[in-house]
Amino acid sequence: MSVTSALFTGVSGLQANGAAMSVIGNNISNVNTVGFKDSRTIFADLLSDNTVNSSQIGKGVQVQTVQNIFTQGSSQTSENVTDLSIQGNTFFSLQAPGVTAASPASSYLSRAGAFSVDSSNTLVNPNGYQVLGTDGKPVTFPADFSKVTKIDSTGHITYLATDGVTQEYYNGNGVAGLPITGTPGVSIAVVSVPSPGALSKVGGSLYQTTAASGAAAATPTFAAATANGTSEKILSNSLEQSNVDMANEFVNMIVTQRAYSANSKTITTTDQMTQEVLQLIR
């Protein structure tokens, strides 16, 4: 291996492990972020050089991908009825403030369910992103809305009217509610993604689909699919916590730091060898 190749190999190791350390640092910094999902760095070797006798010498390492890990986070009890968590593999569907209602397949996805009702009677997250219902529209309550009293495991919402007595089922964007003695109407939408690990992070605990992740599929039959309450379901008065394992992250940090130091040593040693060669020439 030439001196240049050795230096390049060491530099590639520094860059790759430096990127991995950034991922680990981001994981640790978000250990208390609601709905945050852990990430890990996947490495791949670079193209090798052919040498004598059909041998090959590696040319270093690169970051192949930063993969999101969507394991279930623990649930923390909350006093707010509109604080929601999902027990299962689906996502809440949201759209940006002021955007015309879009289908769940083109919306933002999130596992962070710290929702509240804003001044326009719309269910939103802390950044104002609107929660979508199974009708593909923002969950916006009618004029007689007072407060949310219950959200069941299938995402159906019961609210109290302004008279302080009548309770009704939410029945769609701005539409009059339904009597709670009847069949529930529109529920909070959840969507599934074929390959969630390939979703793109856009900040604010939000994700968007990519070609690798596949398009999000709306689940309008969510209520029927979870009638037994044991599979996919929404939990009210509950928030999903970060799935970051601090012990595992510190172990990864130590391993990455040592790999970084070893690559730094490679560069230092190669430089010393170069200096010795130059001394011999002189």
Image: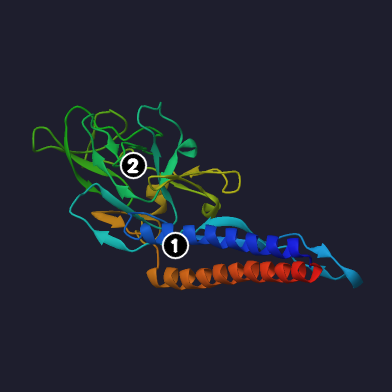
Rendering quarter of residue 177: top left
Number of numbered discs visible in the structure rendering: 2
Compared to 271, does 215 lie above or below? above
Q: Is residue 24 visible?
A: yes
For the residue carrying disc 1, how many other residues have a C-alpha within 10 Å: few (<14), some (14-19), or many (20+)?
A: few
Residue closest to the far front:
282
Quick one: label 2 or label 1, which is nearer the N terminus? Answer: 1
Pick whichever, 92 or 182, lies toward us. 92
Tag shown at residue 187: 2
In the displayed orientation, state which residue is furthest to the right.
53
Image quarter (top left, top right, bottom left or bottom right) of the N terminus:
bottom right
In the picture provided, is 255 more to the left or to the right than 273?
A: left
**From the viewer's perspective, is the residue at label 2 or at label 1 nearer?**
1
* Residue indicated by mark 1: 71
Q: Position of residue 5 (x, y in %)?
A: 74, 62
Q: Residue at x 41, y 29 (%)?
A: 101
Q: Quadrant of the C terminus?
A: bottom right
Quick check: marks 2 and 1 in contact, CB under 8 Å? no
Horizontal arrangement in the rendering, residue 186 relative to residue 168 (left or right): right
Q: Position of residue 33 (x, y in %)?
A: 33, 55
Name which residue type carries label 2.
Ser
- Foreground residue, 183 or 103? 103
Q: Position of residue 196 (x, y in %)?
A: 51, 53
**Viewer can see residue 220:** no
Q: Label 1: state its secondary structure.
A: loop
Residue type indicated by callout 1: Thr
**Mark 2, residues whose alpha carbon is within 10 Å: few (<14), some, or many (≥20)?**
many
Residue 248 point in image, percent of width and height: 44, 71
Distance (Cα) linking label 2 and label 1: 25 Å
* Along the viewing direction, whichever of 56 and 114 lies nearer the viewer: 56
Label 2: element kind: loop
